[in-house]
Amino acid sequence: MRIELVGADGTTLASATTRLDVAEDPRAALILRSDEGDRIEDLIKHGQKMVEVGYLAGARAYFKRAVEAGSGEAALLLGACYDPAFIEKIGAQGIKPDPKEARNWYERAKQLGIADADAKLAELAREWPDTRNPLQEAQEGTAPPAAEEAGATGGAEGPADPATQDSGRPAAVVPVGPTSSGKEEWVELSGYVNLRKAPSQTAETLRIAQKGEKLRVIGRRGSWVQVTDPATHETGWVYSRFIESARSPAQ
């Protein structure tokens, strides 16, 4: 927007320019059920009723649906349903705690803007230390900038990009195609992972890929794997630590 003060004779006496860039909310990538945003409150209430009667399996289902609709509060509640301390506190019977899953949902709550998530993560870390290395935290968007810049060895002096050769030059991208038998290579994501534009932890994040998502492998570079979703033709890179071999969805 440009504003000018013009005199009677047409001379510009003063001017000012303002530019407003509106960026997409990064949390939008975490919302899978945008059409259910008006149901969040009811879903959370149903989940809390399930917690009150000790039926955490049902509570998890309600909270997860609310999270997919964009609720950070539900993500925090869902994490508690896997948290050993919370399960012990309410005396739920026959429920197996899962610290890793609790951590995943607490981190999701943090990404959705819930301030209390940091305290939950810290409390969980004290009782159940996270065995992941800094590179994994960087991939999932939970590490501070210093950790994200650390190399694969976890040291601050390590290489910024693990997909480099000893000479410091980037390793070549190796295309991956169908095998001689015509089979394609597929992988399944083991957690919520940043799908990046290039094979580097400092590359732009295209979106947060969902846990359990299946993608087809089309290339490799060092410890990075290039994947694509044939349904959307979206292509990106994920770190190999966070994927598992999978069968083609057609099988």
Image (tube, rainbow, N blue to C red):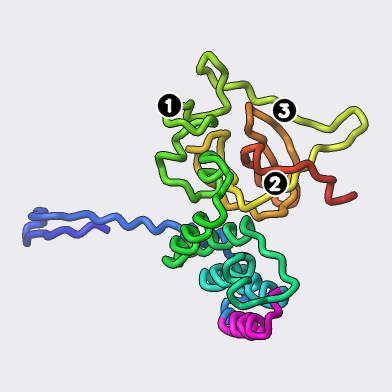
- Look at the image and tell me in which quarter the N terminus lies: bottom left
Determine the main secondary structure of the stretch shown in magenta.
helix
Q: Nearer the viewer, residue 120 or 136?
A: 120
Q: Nearer the viewer, residue 106 or 208?
A: 106
Instruction: Examine the rendered structure and indicate whether residue 93 appears above or below residue 201.
Output: below
Q: Is residue 13 left or right of residue 102?
A: left
- The residue pinned by badge 1 equals 157
Q: Which residues are magenta?
A: 41-56
Q: Is residue 24 left or right of residue 191?
A: left
Query: At 75% across and 30% down in the image, what residue appears?
Result: 176
Residue 90 location (% of width, % of height):
61, 78
Q: Earlier in the sequence, mark 2 or mark 1?
A: 1
Q: What amino acid type should be assigned to the residue bearing mark 3?
A: Pro
Disc 2 to disc 3: CB gap under 8 Å: no
Q: Nearer the viewer, residue 223 or 231?
A: 223
Instruction: Examine the rendered structure and indicate whether residue 208 appears above or below residue 225.
Output: below
- The residue pinned by badge 3 equals 175
Q: What amino acid type should be assigned to the residue bearing mark 1?
A: Glu
- The residue pinned by badge 2 equals 233
